[in-house]
Amino acid sequence: MTDSTGYWAASHYTFYWKLTPSQRQALTERQPLLYVAGNQLERVQPGDVLWMVNVYLGNLYLVGKLLVEFVVDNTELAMELVDPETDEWYDADWYAIANRYNTEPMREVDITPLAGGLRFESDAYQLDLEKGVQATQLSQLRKLTPETAQLLEQVWYDDEYTPEDIQDYLELTEDDKAYNEGKVVVRTLRERQRNRNLVEDAKAQFKALHGSLYCQGCGFSFEDTYGVEYIEAHHLEQMASFEGERQTAIHDLVMLCSNCHRMVHTRTPPLTLTELQDLVKRRAGTGQQFKGE
């Protein structure tokens, strides 16, 4: 869970999910939520958060959280951004793709007791519960107030609601100067555990040194362009190369925008920061200096 100003400045929406049998199975298996498809996603922007909700037997459930990295209107492009070998794809006008470094397992959290307290930034600012929770009231993409978004965030990560194995994934060990990473964690898929404290501390130190968060590859600033403080942290050494658990320090990370982050991973081993900057400069044809150089 994050409490950064930029994160809460982004828009948070409820997105109703009428679960298909395969989606219900994925939920049961706690598979990571990689994308959602729908015809109302055009106004969603990178950095926004989608809260997947479902109504079953009169109860309201949170079933997933997706931090948006891309919003596209092309199925083939969406498949390439997620995984061209994904078994099931849904035909829709728009696709919201999860930030691949922040995907989370789907799970079912009963928020029926909180339904009356949910607030939306619209004329119908709350649910009409006279006849109980009705799916029709949530069928449209609905923007949450910041206070309600924080409430859902708290419930989503609350120990009372979170299964132990997922809580182990979310809560990582703290270390003031170095951070243990690389331990294989069971999260439906097997992947290297990333230390959330490391990333947050690296971003905080970068902002303290440079005054803002921007891409060290191309100089792009989400805050200048979108008004949202957002950046991704890239490990200079691939975690897949770790032999077991090891320590990673702040200086082992660089700040990259989503495009540059994907670009460095188009090659194995990934492009170095210098190679990325040289590539951007050559394409721009300017030999420009980057912030911080």
Image (cartoon, helix red, strand yellow):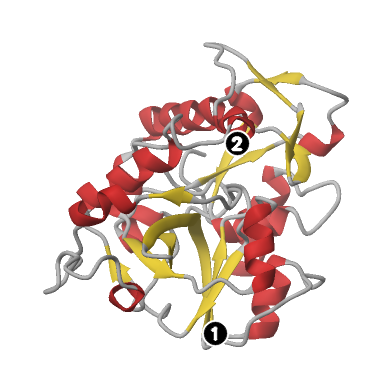
Let me know if residue 151 appears in the view.
yes
First of labels 1, 2 by sequence position: 1
Vertical position of residue 14 compared to residue 91: above or below: above
Rate crowding at label 1 as few (under 14), some (14 to 19) or many (20 or more) other CA atoms within 10 Å. some
Residue visible at 69% across and 62% down in the picture? 25
Which residue lies under the disc numbered 1?
A: 73
Number of callouts in the render?
2
Query: What is the secondary structure assignment of the residue under circle 2?
Result: helix
**Pointer 2 residue:** 166
Residue at coordinates 62% horizontally, 61% vertically from top-left? 34
**Location of residue 161 in the rendering, given as x and y in whole percent from the top left corner:** 46, 37
Label 2: few (<14), some (14–19) or many (≥20) C-alpha neighbours in 10 Å = some
- In the image, farthest residue toward the top: 176
Q: Which amino acid type corresponds to the residue marked 1 in the rendered image? A: Asp
Is residue 31 visible in this depiction of the protein?
no
Residue 80 in the figure: left or right of residue 126: right
Mark in the foreground, 1 or 2: 2
Identity of the amino acid at label 2? Ile
Q: Is residue 267 left or right of residue 80?
A: right
Which image quadrant: the N terminus? top left
Counting from the top left corner in percent of width and height, residue 228 is at: 33, 54
Q: Who's the residue at 43% across and 31% down the image? A: 160
- Give the percent coordinates (x, y) of residue 5: 29, 42
Name above or below for residue 284 compared with residue 257: below
Residue 188 in the figure: left or right of residue 171: right
What percent of the width, then of the height, locates residue 148? 24, 51
- Above or below, comparing residue 94 to residue 55 in the picture: below
Q: Quadrant of residue 241?
A: top right
Judge by depth and name the residue closer to the eye, 149 or 164: 164
Report the front residue among 145 and 289.
145
- Mark 1 lies on a secondary structure that is loop
